[in-house]
Amino acid sequence: MGTNNPQINQEEIKAVPFVADESIEWENVAPGMNRKIMGYDGRVMLVKVSFEEGAIGALHSHYHTQISYVDSGSFNVEIDGKHQILNKGDVFYVAPNLVHGVVCLKEGMLIDVFSPMREDFIKASVY
Amino acid sequence: MGTNNPQINQEEIKAVPFVADESIEWENVAPGMNRKIMGYDGRVMLVKVSFEEGAIGALHSHYHTQISYVDSGSFNVEIDGKHQILNKGDVFYVAPNLVHGVVCLKEGMLIDVFSPMREDFIKASVY
């Protein structure tokens, strides 16, 4: 969090083929949860979300398909009322409009993919 | 490669919310390159691609948007004639129809995301 690396703004990301991890600043989105939007176009967006142990991605839903990859750590994932503990290397798929959320059991990171892209993330970053 | 875990067939993946890494078999797709299709619907697909050092993802293009996350290892990535070395945590974005490829410099894995999904991957697996 809070390095001195130059930050790429959201509009530029869209056109950048190569995105170094350290070129994007972490953005705090909830207690113990930080996010980096790594790339997108209208069709798809890839986002890193880091979680401290105990951090909660609250239950919510959206019309976008979501596929998430567990990069590290351990998570109790809830989708449409079903729970599963997922660890490094596992994946979950959230069909459009299903209620879902996570509780972080062990510090780690999810790679969240959305299709189409999350316009709401970009607006939130700009305004 | 070649564990005795039950394999989820391609049609089932589509509807499975929770996908354990070990439930999917590696599929050899090129020398030193193996793939697991982890989840998809019509909009988007998430695929793991493991590379041995020296393995080559040959230059090619497709109409899908691709965003790839470097899960581990080191890769020389070429997109539209530009080269960049990317390491764990970095991302690359391939706009539709741009010629791209990778050379693995250090054993590792990419998380490849495609939008829309790669119908050609599913056909190749079924037939």
Image (cartoon, coloured by chain):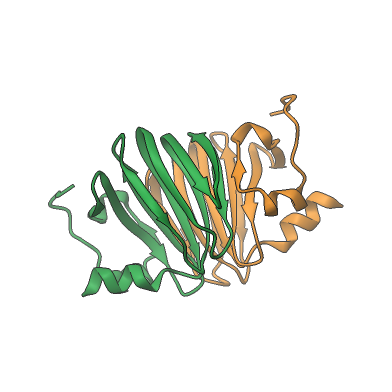
Chain colours: A orange, B green
In x, y percent, where is residue B95? Answer: 59, 60
In x, y percent, where is residue B42? Answer: 47, 75
Kindly identify the residue that appears in the image at 32 percent across and 52 percent down: B20
Q: Is residue A125 above or below residue A106?
A: below
In x, y percent, where is residue B100? Answer: 48, 53
Which quarter of the picture shows residue B60? bottom left
In x, y percent, where is residue B51? Answer: 32, 42
Q: Nearer the viewer, residue A125 or B92?
A: B92
* Residue placed furthest toward the top: A4
Q: Quadrant of the C terminus of chain B?
A: bottom left
Kindly identify the residue that appears in the image at 18 percent across and 59 percent down: B6
Which quarter of the picture shows residue A34? top right
Q: Is residue B55 left or right of residue A48?
A: left
Which quarter of the picture shows residue B120? bottom left
Kindly identify the residue that appears in the image at 27 percent across and 70 percent down: B124
Q: Is residue A64 left or right of residue B106?
A: right
Kindly identify the residue that appears in the image at 59 percent across and 62 percent down: A44
* Residue placed furthest toward the right: A127
Q: Nearer the viewer, residue A8 or A53?
A: A8
* Residue placed furthest toward the front: B81
Number of numbered discs on residues: 0
Q: Nearer the viewer, residue A51 or A27?
A: A27
Residue A73 appears in the rendering: no
Residue B104 appears in the rendering: yes
Q: Is residue B122 left or right of residue B46?
A: left
